[in-house]
Image (cartoon, coloured by chain):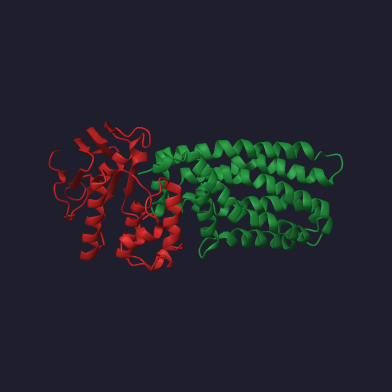
Amino acid sequence: MRLIAENLGGERGGETVFSNIGFALEKGEALIVTGPNGAGKSTLLRVVAGLLPAARGKVLIEGDGEAFPTVASASHYLGHLNAMKTALSVEENLGFWRAFQGEPGLDVEEALETVALDGLGHLPFGYLSTGQRRRASIARLLVSRRPVWLLDEPTAGLDKASEERFAGVMRGHLQDGGIVVAATHLPLGLEGAKALRMGETI
Amino acid sequence: MWALFLRDIRLSIRAGGGALIGVIFFLAVIVTIPFGVGPDLNLLSRIGPAILWIAALLACLLGLDRLFQADREDGSLDLLVLNGDRHMLGLTVLTKCLAHWTGSVLPLVVAAPLLGLFMNMEPLGIGATALTLLVGTPAITFIGAAGAAVAVALPRGGLLISVLVLPLTIPVLIFGVSASYGAVADPAPFLQPFLILAALTLFLAVLGPLAAALALRHGTD
């Protein structure tokens, strides 16, 4: 499986944010996207996910045609927002995404254990702290399987221990033949990851 | 899809879901009418079906702005759109509409017979009005979904949705009210307008969610 972006350009409200971005990621490879605020990191991830149309160029996925024909169907997208309902409990939220997203992976209990939230599953999502919400949101990546993880500032709000645990989760995903594209300011603790600096090429 | 339906139903009955707001608004409108119109029982029973329908229509529009906005604010909408290859977005919207209808509009239909008593309607008229509301209100939700999808990015989109959607719901209102009248006033037919109402609901069940899905797909930013 390969994730390829060719000559990608992105726009926001008619203004070109970035252009001529290209990368090719094989199974088990990670790409860390860095750059100053406003360089277009989030826009790049949304274009790759297909949530925004690409102004130029295209994004392709090759090799896993049957199960995941398009980039959108092969991707987990973890944005700034956690995509969880505050009125529902953590378990209900994760259970919903597990059922809706299909391709079930870990069950809800195991996923919560992986992000060290076991025992808090019955609480309404709204009662959790910022870091705990982020961890619950990371658990969403685990309850259904997707080869490509698109992560936008995944460690925002996490403490040191959780950052390390999350790095372990990402390494596990890469070892299973997954692909990670992460936009971040903080080191994620992934050795051998490719790097893409945005905001300097333009 | 079932999971999405259950989640939306749960949200509508939990705190802040607003399932009862529509019913309370419906009640308030119907209770106010006799004070405004006066204690003329014949007049009240004559305008009863129309008033019930108009009040139900407005109550339906009340909660529509949150249909997609709540999902957009917490990022769920992105994921619903992203899963469009697995679950066709139109079907996702249809499911959300059905959940919204069950959670927020069905209580109106259930309350309608009781409120019909306030309007001095006869039992047959009450039954007919409740039946037409049951068949006709889903159409309002489906049209409303398209309006809600267009206005999803606007912070105060509620009124705009009502203004956008209201003209499109007029046919539903006309056939709903004329079927309700047909059941009680003898020369007027009941079955024909009722069948057209049912046809409108079925037609809009396809068109509304597809239009909403198109708007949502192009509305992400």
Residue B168 shows in this picture: yes
Q: Residue at x 34, y 54 (%)?
A: A81
Q: Tell me where residue A110 appears, x and y as whole percent.
A: 36, 59
User: Foreground: B79 or B158?
Assistant: B79
The chain drawn in red is: A
Q: A38 above or below A160?
A: above
User: Foreground: B3 or B50?
Assistant: B3
Q: Quadrant of the C terminus of chain B?
A: top left
Q: Tell me where residue A95 appears, x and y as whole percent.
A: 44, 56
Q: B179 above or below A79?
A: above
- Left or right: where A23 falls relative to A85: left
Quarter assignment of residue B123: bottom right
Q: Residue at x 71, y 56 (%)?
A: B112
Quarter assignment of residue A107: bottom left
Chain B shade: green
Q: Residue at x 31, y 54 (%)?
A: A80
Q: Residue at x 77, y 36 (%)?
A: B192
Q: B207 above or below A116?
A: above
Residue B153 shows in this picture: no
Q: Tell me where residue B93 appears, x and y as whole percent.
A: 51, 44
Q: Tell me where residue B98 appears, x and y as whole percent.
A: 58, 48
